[in-house]
Amino acid sequence: MRNHGFTLIEMLIVFGILALLGAALMTSLGSGIEKADKGIDKLQLMQHYGRLLETYRDGEALPEEGGAKFVYYPWVAGKMQRTPEELESFFHANSLSPRLREMLSGDTRLVATSYDEIDSECTDFAGRAAEHYTPRMFTNGHEPLMATDNEQGNAYSDGSVLVLYGNGAVREIARRSIPEAAGDPDYVIEVGPESPVADLRKLRR
């Protein structure tokens, strides 16, 4: 008569199945979290568009260098409430940026009050380069204004870049659309003058 207990082999099989199910669940959860973070970043970029447009319409002078300083244009111009929540909108959702932690450690009303205090580490987004400023860039749906900058490596595991355009729309540039990225799962899409993407050459960190 057979003992009803599990044999060692049966237990190993059960543990193996549980491990596979757990790995699949974690992958699914991770993918879902990243998808949600990407959605938040898209919303943040659209909100930045509204602030950028309002600031420009109010006649505030554009920052001379562009890039990260352009991203902070409404903040420096005083068109945003300088709260911790607003400051976090300059970074990816759930950003691990050491600079963000440093900036949040004090009174955010006193942070980045002039362009001299701002560099590329003050944001996870790249902004329009000054040499590409045009009067119609805030109303032209073909003109890029901001993008996720990949300065610390790929912002998303799929290697995509989110780009905000001059009509307030956010479009995604997929890594698979870049010929240079073929077969390279770690390829990082450069943002700036050396980018393989024409639109991203109009931006700088």
Image: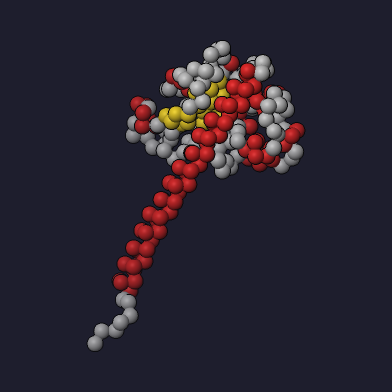
User: Total of numbered circles in the picture?
Assistant: 0
Measuring 35% from the left and 26% from the top, which residue is drawn there?
Answer: 179
Task: Please tell me in which quadrant of the rendered image residue 54 appears.
Answer: top right
> Based on the displayed image, in which of its 4 quarters is residue 105 positioned?
top right
Where residue 70 sits, quadrant-wise, is top right
Q: Residue furthest bottom?
A: 1
The answer to whether 158 is drawn above or below residue 130 in the figure is below
Where residue 93 appears, x then y in whole percent?
55, 40
The location of residue 115, given as percent across then percent down, is 69, 23
Q: Residue furthest left?
A: 1
Task: Give the x, y percent position of residue 173.
Answer: 42, 29
Q: Residue at x 48, y 43 (%)?
A: 36
Q: Residue 61: x and y, percent?
A: 67, 16
Q: Is residue 34 above or below residue 42?
A: below
The answer to whether residue 149 is visible is: no
Residue visible at 46% across and 19% down in the picture: 142
Front in this rendered view, residue 127 or 184: 127
In this rendered view, identify the residue nearer to me: 55 or 12. 55
- Say left or right for 11 vs 41: left
From the image, which quarter does the N terminus lie in? bottom left
Residue 200 visible in image: yes
Q: What residue lies at 34% left-to-right and 31% top-to-bottom? A: 182
In the image, 191: left or right of 110?
left
Colour scheme employed for the rendering of this structure: secondary structure
| Nearer the observer, 112 or 37 | 37
Is residue 142 depicted above or below 181 in this figure?
above
The quadrant of the image that shows the C terminus is top right
